[in-house]
Amino acid sequence: MRRSTIIFALLITATLFGIVAARENTRSQFIALQEAQARHFALDNRWGQLQLEQATLASNARVGDIARQKLGLAAPKNDQIVMVKAP
Amino acid sequence: MTYPGAPLHSPQLVTLPAWRATAVWTVVALGLAAIMAQAWRAQVERGPFLRDQGAQRYLRHFALPAQRGPILDRSGKALALSVPVQTLWVDPRLFNPQQAYWPQIAAALGISAAALAARTHSGGSRFAFLARQIAPERAATILALHVPGLYSLNENRRYYPSGSIAAPLLGFTNVDGRGIEGLEMAYNQWLQGKAGEETGLRDNLGHPLAILGTARLAQPGQTLTLSIDRNIQYVAYTALASAVQRFQAHSGAAVLMNVHTGEILAMVSYPSFNPNERTDYQPSLYNNRAIADTFEPGSVMKPFTIAAALDDGSIQPNSTFDVNTNCFRVAHYCIQDDIRHGILDLAQVLKYSSNIGAAKISLRTPPADLYQMLRNVGFGQVSGLGLPGETGGTVPAWRGWDVARRAAMAYGYGLSVTPLQLAAAYGAIANNGVYVQPTLLRRASTPSPHSQQVIPVATAARLRDWLAGVTSRGGTGFLAAIPGYSVAGKTGTSIMANGKGGFHKHQVNTTFVGFAPANNPRFVMAVVVRGPTQGWRYGGVVAAPVFRVTMSAALHQMGVQPDVSASAWNAAAGKPRSADQERRWAEGAGDAAH
């Protein structure tokens, strides 16, 4: 009778510690999840901005302007085009 | 104090009646039973309902936004992108007492304090938008103030890196991320994705405390890869824009298509709008004129008149027509040519764009055959692109055609078409008589499942030869000639109907439709410039240069080798007719800045 009481008390104590550990685990996992989500959002955001930046930098209008104004390029006139036949 | 005669020790035990104890136990037992019963009801019978009611009072559902899929061109360059942004909202009951923060918030948002106050009062009693879809960095500075009653939502905003060049084709989304125009609308289901949801506890500042249950993850939208080539689209747009500006025209549209697969490489409409900044709301600019604007096509219909007549044997490939008159009278109409010619064969009817010749051909052809030919090559019906706003044009039923209508149909009056239909119909001539349904989606070089032989192979080959004459020396489409390549095409200049049964005196539609290389066609393009008011207002002058510039860019871009040697090309093309033509042609691919 007395021994079984002690065993039960020990089991209950162990269970209580288990609950505390599980709670703590959940909480730390949740914090990790939050951090991961925030990072995901930040990376998504950065990726979107980079895509946008790349598309803007590569836009035909911009490239055309630079070619014309900075590099002084122009599309060849028809009589400037020389066709060569591949041997 | 004692009473006399009373016993000195313990009081006398009085035996109570047994029923009192029973009664007490019964009351206690009944009470417990009632509690048990109530507990049973609460826990078991109504348990789920009560738990749910409880959860509703402290759990909150949060939407997880799904990112809308991007729209890419055929080589994977972005045409429309979704970028994460943040929306700030307030609970006015909590936010209104925090006026000390207001000047700081207003300054960060770049608005006045009065505007901020107006925004907090623009929603309900517990919800109002403070700023929608702002950059996350900007939102972060405001959220860092930790103002009670101020919350944020993660959203996505749509950006169009190519700006106005493809705007009427792509359309746009509304602030809630739903496509409401163009391809964004047509493929909304595909692009949209599915929003997720998570359930959990949050504190009064909206920070998550715990998540309960499994979240339904957001499913991002799918990528839409178009057949459009961004470079060719850009060249087409700038060439069209400079033609519209140079000739001070009303508007313009152009479509460039692969003749074998039906893939559309460029579809432009001018004037356009900036899809990234739509404060100047002008619905007329949202029109995709390449599919929504119909017009009487004029001379570009002549090849189909000839095809129908050859097809049913009404004329022979070597038939000739006497057009040596100033006025060919049909009913009470007088049909005229711009320049008087003598006797023309079929090639010359096309090369000089003779209305009289075309009318004579049509009057020999049973109207049912011409009607059937026009329907077969796609006129009078929508193309099946699935874009909102597409119109099918009109081809009136042949039974109602009188003799004047029959003559007029020959050179493109009395019916209306779209630029897309013209490109697809000429595509059939270019593609050995096989009509291919146009598509805006990228196809892996397999022929379209929706293709149909509509013109006999031999007739299509003859038409290609004859149409190549149009861009040669003395032809009306000379300005469409591209050095090194054989080009076939047809010019069109039609007087615009005034909608009251007559015509505007000075308003014309100028058109050029053609394909290249003429010997082994790869691409077909239709260009329409509506209402030019300056200079020579002919399809060969206004629209043909747009074709030349865009088509040569497409041929180079897609790696099509020149098919005519320089000397042969010079001999065939020869010199232009006038000094002005010479100058305009010599500009070559041009470099219209836009």
Image (spheres, rainbow, N blue to C red):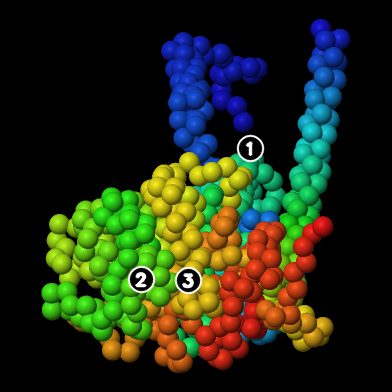
To which residue does mark 3 refer?
Answer: B470
Chain that bears disc 1: B
Chain that bears disc 3: B
Locate residue A45 relative to residue B64 in the image: left or right: right
- For residue B344, which numbered disc appears in the image? 2
To which residue does mark 1 refer?
Answer: B213
Q: Secondary structure at mark 2?
A: strand
In front: label 3 or label 2 = 2
In front: label 3 or label 1 = 3
Residue at x 53%, y 73% (from the top left corner): B472
In the rendered image, the quadrant that contains the C terminus of chain B is bottom right
Type of residue at label 2?
A: Leu
Q: Are marks 3 and 2 in contact (CB under 8 Å)?
A: no
- For residue A58, which numbered disc appears in the image? none
Measure the alpha-carbon separation of dots 3 and 2: 14 Å
Type of residue at label 1?
A: Gly
Nearer-N-terminus badge (3/2): 2
Nearer-N-terminus badge (2/1): 1
